[in-house]
Image (cartoon, grey):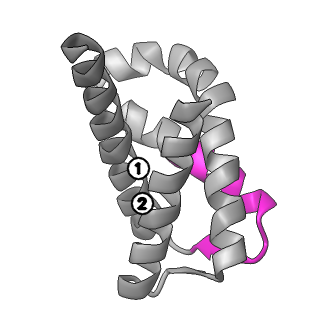
Amino acid sequence: MGKLIVRFLAYFLIFMLLSTFIPGVAGDIAGFVLLAALLAIANLLIRPLLTVVALPFNLLTFGIASVFVNMLTLIIADAIVISAGIAGFWNLALVSVLIMAADSCIRAARHAQMNKG
């Protein structure tokens, strides 16, 4: 449960920061809260299935297919939320890469915490 909350907060901060710098990422606070919550749940439930399906492509492209898996989960969450959204392929790709980086940082921090204590 704590992992889900940390991911939600990271996604929310990414959406809020990008909305100030990139015109293609737009929405209000309530929309970003809903988008971050749906994305955290989608990454928990849907992304592992999509990762298994995309594994052969991931091996052939040396991991680039995982960016498209992340983009697909973003598209799913974005289609549900009306009050916030990401317009354009490159904006979607940028948000996807930043979310992957945030997930990697969260995973590394949790791994370091588990090894420390």
Image point 46% across, 41% down: which residue?
Answer: 68
Residue, far front: 117
Observer able to see residue 100: yes
Q: CA distance from mark 2 to mark 1?
A: 6 Å
Residue named by callout 2: 95
Q: Position of residue 13 (x, y in %)?
A: 45, 65
Q: Is residue 89 visible?
A: no
User: Cβ–Cβ below 8 Å for labels 2 and 1?
Assistant: yes
Three-letter residue code for mark 1: Ile
- As drawn, 88 above or below 63: below
- Find out whether residue 51 is within the magenta segment: no
The label shown at residue 48 is none
Percent coordinates x, y for residue 94 in the rendering: 36, 61
On the image, numbered disc 1 is attached to which residue? Answer: 99
Q: Nearer the viewer, residue 53 or 60?
A: 53
Q: Foreground: 70 or 53? A: 70
Taken as a whole, is the magenta stretch helix, strand or loop? helix
**Circle 2: residue type:** Val
Of the 4 image quadrants, the one containing the N terminus is top right
Secondary structure of residue under mark 2: helix
User: Residue 44: percent from the left, percent from the top?
Assistant: 62, 29
Judged left or right of residue 27, residue 93 is left
Q: Nearer the viewer, residue 109 or 48?
A: 109
| Within-10-Å neighbours for mark 2: few <14, some 14–19, many 20+ | many
Range of the magenta residues?
A: 71-86
**If the image is split into quadrants, where does the C terminus sit?**
top left
Q: Is residue 109 above or below residue 87?
A: above
Residue drawn at x 39%, y 32% as measured from the top left: 65
